[in-house]
Amino acid sequence: MSKQDFGASIQKSSGWRNWVEVPLVISGALIIFALMGLSVSDALLRSFFNKPVFGANDYAQILLSFAVAASFPLCVIAGRLIAIDTLVLMMPKPVQYWLDWLVTALGAIMLGYVAWRAFFNALEAATFGEATLLLQLPYGPSYYAVAAGCGVSAVLVVLERVLR
């Protein structure tokens, strides 16, 4: 594929990618900055005034789960999934092609399964009232976020393979 063809394919797919990537990057950045602010303020208040932020660990748990959920699809879009293809590159091109599709299908199935389990764990957490220890923040939204992140990632893995 020439550089012009590659650039054209990126421009074609950049429209839908922006709709997915930009909100995830912005929300992920806001969550990470909130985590940083929480950690710094907790440490400073603890050190200087002996008054830590009440429930900082509970807030950090919930915020971290949302940050991880936002990072799953971003890893897929950036092409930063783990792939060790040393042996695959030594195989004939048709075998490489089919193995690539097989790995894509298995990855999508695994991400879909994690999304499904996280969704049902969210339902169970809501039913049983699972919450953090100190502030009693519900775990349900965290599970829903992970389910959404894995579900979107499963779709993106297949979409990236089809559009390549």
Image (tube, grey):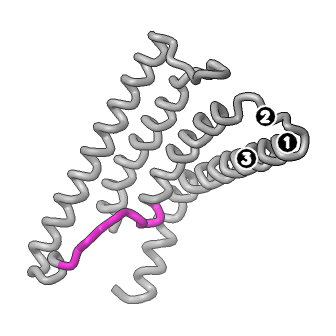
* Residue behind mark 3: 39
Would residue 79 appear left or right of 42 to someone viewing this image?
left
Three-letter code for the amino acid on which mark 1 is drawn: Leu
Q: Are marks 2 and 1 in contact (CB under 8 Å)?
A: yes
* Residue behind mark 2: 53
Q: Return the x and y of residue 123 as percentages of the image width and height.
A: 42, 18
Q: Residue at x 41, y 16 (%)?
A: 124
* Residue behind mark 1: 45
Instruction: Residue 78: say if magenta.
Output: yes
In this rendering, is residue 30 above or below 50? below
- Tell me which secondary structure the magenta stretch mostly adopts: loop
Q: Place residue 101 in its image quadrant.
A: bottom left
Q: Return the x and y of residue 136 as percentages of the image width and height.
A: 62, 18
Q: Which residues are magenta?
A: 77-86
Q: Return the x and y of residue 119 as percentages of the image width and height.
A: 40, 27
Three-letter code for the amino acid on which mark 2 is drawn: Val
Give the foreground label among 3 and 1. Answer: 1
Q: Residue at x 22, y 52 (%)?
A: 105
Q: Work out how far the residue at label 3 is from the one at label 1, CA to CA, in angstroms.
A: 10 Å
Q: Are marks 2 and 3 in contact (CB under 8 Å)?
A: no
In this rendering, is residue 82 above or below 137? below
Q: Work out how far the residue at label 2 is from the one at label 1, CA to CA, in angstroms.
A: 7 Å
Disc 3 secondary structure class: helix
Disc 1 secondary structure class: helix
Classify mark 3: residues with Cα within 10 Å, few (<14), some (14-19) or many (20+). Answer: some
Residue situated in front as seen by the camera: 27 or 133: 133
Mark 2 or mark 3: name the one nearer the start of the chain.
3
Disc 2 secondary structure class: loop
Mark 2 or mark 1: name the one nearer the start of the chain.
1
